[in-house]
Amino acid sequence: MDRLRIDKWLWAARFYKTRSLAADEIGKHRVQVNGEVAKASREVKPGDKVTVRLGPFTREVLVRGLSGQRGPAPVAQQLYEETPESLAAQAAVREQRRLGSEPALSIEQGRPTKRDRRELESARRGNWDNRWSASLDDDE
């Protein structure tokens, strides 16, 4: 076997859980072979460069072997070799996500958090009734 369909190879290399998921992602143009957008029927051979976009990560791998059946993960990892640029980009994305702010902290509307609710309750119990009012004085 010197050539294999890209959807079958991606499934065997454990990039996607099923062949149909691999074909769907290829149909959405998230997979490239040698810099060109691939179709599910595109054949790959050892030495080809495959670019796969998986969520926030873009992985570039070189095809090292072909397998028509899905095997254990250690065997699947021998089917490809990840490029150093891809590994560096993944590390940069992980670091950026780690240093990024928590998205929930930027929410300004919606239901109050437990902390907000407690602050509201303490304000109601505290000096809420003793606040000053803007009434007119009759001192004139």
Image: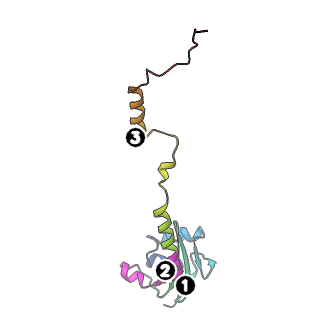
Q: Amino acid at mark 2?
A: Trp
Q: Quadrant of the C terminus?
A: top right
What is the x, y in percent for residue 97? Answer: 48, 63
Judge whether 1 appears above or below 37 on screen: below
Q: Secondary structure at mark 3?
A: helix
Judge whether 126 appears above or below 41 on screen: above
Q: Residue at x 44, y 78 (%)?
A: 12
The residue that disc 2 covers is 9
Q: Residue at x 55, y 80 (%)?
A: 50
What is the x, y in percent for residue 66? Answer: 47, 86
The residue that disc 1 covers is 44
Q: Which residues are magenta?
A: 70-88
Mark 3 or 1, nearer chain start? 1
**Count of numbered marks:** 3
Return the residue nearer the eye: 12 or 91: 91
Mark 2 or 1, nearer chain start? 2
CA gap, disc 2 and disc 3: 51 Å
Q: Amino acid at mark 1?
A: Val
Q: Quadrant of residue 18?
A: bottom left
**Label 1 crowd bin: few (<14), some (14–19), many (20+), radius 10 Å:** many
**Label 2 crowd bin: few (<14), some (14–19), many (20+), radius 10 Å:** many
Mark 2 or 3, nearer chain start? 2
CA gap, disc 3 and disc 1: 56 Å
In screen coordinates, is 67 left or right of 39? left
The residue that disc 3 covers is 115
Judge whether 131 appears above or below 115 on screen: above
Q: Secondary structure at mark 1?
A: strand
Q: Residue furthest bottom?
A: 2
Q: Residue furthest front?
A: 140
